[in-house]
Image (cartoon, rainbow, N blue to C red):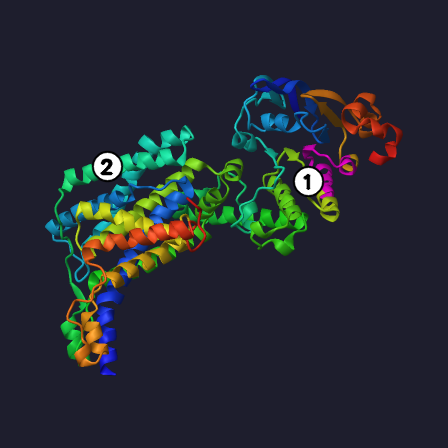
Amino acid sequence: MDGALNSFLLLSNFVLVPGMAYGSQLAIGALGVTLVYGILRFSNFAHGDTMAFGTMAVILVTWLLQAWGVSISPLPTALLALPFGILATIVLLLLTDRWVYRFFRREKAAPVVFLIASVGVMFVMNGVVRFIIGPNDQRFADGERFIIKAREFKRLTGMNEGVAFKTSQGLTIVTAVIVVAALFWFLNRTRAGKSMRAYSDNEDLALLSGINPERVVMITWILAAALATIAGTLYGLDKSFKPFTYFQLLLPIFASAIVGGLGNPLGAIAGGFIIAFSEVTVTYAYKKFLAYNLPPDWAPDSLMQLLSTDYKFAVSFVILVLVLLIRPTGIFRGKAI
Amino acid sequence: MIEVKDLHMHFGGIHAVDGVSLSFEGGRITGLIGPNGAGKTTLFNVIAGLHQPTSGQVLLDGADITGLKPHELFAKGMLRTFQIAQEFSTLTVRENLMMVPANQSGERLLDTWIRPAQVAREEEQVRAKADEVIEFLEISQVADELAGNLSGGQKKLLELGRTMMVDAKIVFLDEVGAGVNRTLLNTLGDAILRLQKERGYTFCMIEHDMDFISRLCDPVIVMAEGAVLTQGSIDEVKANELVIEAYLGTGLKNKPEAVS
């Protein structure tokens, strides 16, 4: 009994809690991708670097606030900086739209042209971020690091295994719930949200009904900027900020959006958790877990890790390819690519 | 009223509309008939702003509206419905109707923050209007149904409802009766007649169903091969030799009751 409970705690500590946090981060990132796809009808490859830009803005403001001695301890100062980061990202995306995408919209360019343009935008944003903050790792999490530490947990419960719960993980999950609730409220209850859905559903009729496409596009970019900045900041708080990591995040984020069904917000959330848990469970070393559940002399010597963490992106890639082969519209029947 | 002056619409070597001049009188239901390929739908598309005409002019109450975009015409109270009904399938019927009025303040993000009272008031007005339209069209039983789940005929009613949301002046109906069963067709016909009589709508419709045309349309314009053949009341048109030849077929000469 103790073995089972301990092994459950072990999994909670190394799989469940990190998976929930990572899943929430991917879900918020994928929501941004899926919204842009639903409205503008192209896969925005610059989303990962938009996240990097937003996080960078948050970090810069955080440093400024820290220098001024502003703090909301035990919560990280970055939360206070978040609205400013979002604003900066909104400005960036609206300018990008004006300088790049609007031209192609007027030309009525094919989706693949937008996609290629977004790759270009990605490289530019990538360069801008590295130029401003440098390519190195930045840690900007301050305040209390843990809600509960593993050692404390052991002391309180008297178990062998402790479950650590980081502030950043708690924040991520709470923020994800709030963001998702707010987004769905916006899409389903407000006029602006409904006009977005209408535009996504039937563009011709929306135009005929006098829905202003430029306004719908603008709202979409504003939402995408907010989602990207929030997702990026949460990821950065949880791990650390490095521009290249954010570029790499593009793959699991796209996998999440596509697995759930591109253009479908619910699918993006489900996809985020599917990808996150696949990644975490496949790269987790099961040695200790098996030791708890097997007779003592059966306990394995090796790490019992299916895949080294170096290859974690391969997991999303495999899932992505499988979904595209078997069910291109995704679980929630989004739009086929 | 709409005036079309010497309109040409060429697609490469094909003269789909070849010098059409006609007018749709205000407050009347004008029928546009003709054999397939006569250029009816092309004429509609040009008037409704989907195509830029090769040459010619379209006037609305004397003002030049040639080549204006569909949403610009919409703002002038000119709407068209489609041969295949269009709807926002993931919104309810009521939401579909409420989507119609342009420039609602709730569509601007800023206004929802700084002027919530005005947004709520407008929303309330639009909702009241939608409820009135739903009642007029007698579709209250499906008001909260997703529009994508409606039958073909109900979708046509919804199309008509959409025109009512903005009190359109001129409505172009493209084969509104196509694929609609008799009962619903009568409901549709009733609604169109009431809109014309009670609210002074101008309709202009492409239609193949002769009963439907006889019941609603006066006058009727006949097109063939990209040009206007003749126009007049349905009886005059039916008696016209040219029309019988071009459109109704020679076999009908002997049994005119087939079309009445």
Quarter holding the C terminus of chain A is top left
Image check: A292 left or right of B11? left
Predominant SS of the magenta segment: helix
Residue indicated by mark 1: B178
Q: Considering depth in this image, is A334 or A100 the residue closer to the camera?
A: A334
Q: Is residue B206 magenta?
A: yes
Residue indicated by mark 2: A123
Question: Residue B174 at x, y = what percent?
Answer: 65, 35
Question: Residue A280 at x, y = what percent?
Answer: 25, 61
Q: Which mark is residue B198?
A: none
Q: CA distance from mark 1 to mark 2?
A: 52 Å
Q: Which residues are magenta?
A: B189-213
Q: Chain of mark 2?
A: A
Question: Residue A304 at x, y = what percent?
Answer: 20, 67
How many circles with numbers are drawn on the protein?
2
Q: Is residue B130 magenta?
A: no
Amino acid carrying label 2: it is: Phe
* Mark 2, secondary structure of its residue: helix
Q: Residues within 10 Å of mark 1 (few under 14, many from 20)?
A: some
Going by the picture, which residue comes out furthest to the bottom? A1
> In this view of the protein, can residue A183 be seen by the observer?
no
Q: Chain of mark 1?
A: B
Q: Considering depth in this image, is A40 or A335 the residue closer to the camera?
A: A335
Amino acid carrying label 1: it is: Ala
Q: Residue at x 22, y 80 (%)?
A: A3
Mark 1–mark 2 CB contact (< 8 Å): no
Q: Residue at x 33, y 56 (%)?
A: A272
Q: Residues within 10 Å of mark 2 (few under 14, many from 20)?
A: some
Looking at the rendering, which quadrant does residue A221 occupy? Answer: top left
* Mark 1, secondary structure of its residue: loop
Q: Residue at x 14, y 42 (%)?
A: A133
Quarter holding the N terminus of chain A is bottom left
